[in-house]
Image (tube, rainbow, N blue to C red):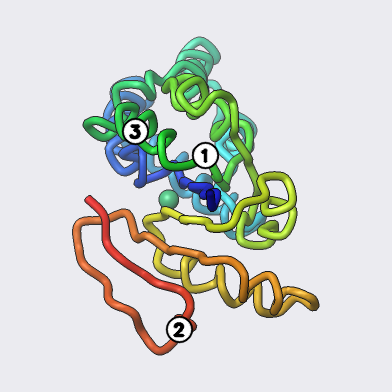
Amino acid sequence: MPTLVFLIDVDNTLIDNDFVKSDLDEHIKVQMGETVTNRFWELYEQTREDGDVINIPLALKWLREQTPLSELDEQTYEHVHSLFDNYPFFNALYPYTLETLRYLRTPGLTVILSDGDLYFQAEKIFNSAIAETVEGRVLLYTHKQEHLHEIMKQFPADHYAMIDDKPQILIDTPQSLCNKENMQQARNQRTFILILACNISVTCGPTVPNNFCMCSQY
Ligand SMILES: [Mg+2]
């Protein structure tokens, strides 16, 4: 019987990350005020520019270094840090997320494939019970589309279904597979289904090779 692996994104696919960000914004504004909070989000974006991905511990470190105690005392800073460290991600799961992950385990193997800030991603995935629900199969990368070959070696299957909210990652996936030598044969034998996790329908476009499908979910 052909085997199937689901490669499932986290942010804005399983967890409502936009809600998390606005919720944290609301809480840290209460603690630090609007000016220091705005400075924090600027530093947050700066970590993305410097390192290509968001790095919250680094943004918090920069905030401490660049903000005098008269504007942000140590106790408030530690409290804000703990709001990030202990955020209840379980509450930010989309409805029926864990049930869906359990259901997908029947036709195939579920693997979490996430990227971004590695410390907070790990925290988020464990804290929200996602890791437990997929029996610990969690892969974290800075840029996941650069590691597809390793992933396919680690979880060999006849078919893969990649679920992500970012169309660009889905478009990059066949491209990055095609760029590697010796992949033509593998591509011919395997199906990669690309599923956009959002509320809109996306049909196959010219940038998606014929043997790759893009469809909608949710
Ligand atoms: Mg995402």
Residue topped by disc 2: 210
Circle 3 SS class:
helix
| Label 1: how many Cα within 10 Å (few below 14, some 14–19, many 20+) | some
Quarter of the rendering containing residue 180:
bottom right
Q: Position of residue 140 (x, y in %)?
A: 63, 41
Task: From the viewer's perspective, tell me whether residue 206 is left or right of residue 144.
Answer: left
- Inspect this view and state whether residue 33 appears: no
Circle 1 SS class:
strand
Disc 2 residue type?
A: Asn
Residue topped by disc 3: 103
Q: Residue at x 59, y 50 (%)?
A: 47
Disc 3 residue type?
A: Tyr
Which disc is residue 5 wearing? none
Q: Position of residue 62 (x, y in %)?
A: 62, 37
Name the N-terminal-most of marks 2 and 1. 1
Q: How far apart are the alpha carbons under marks 2 and 1?
A: 25 Å
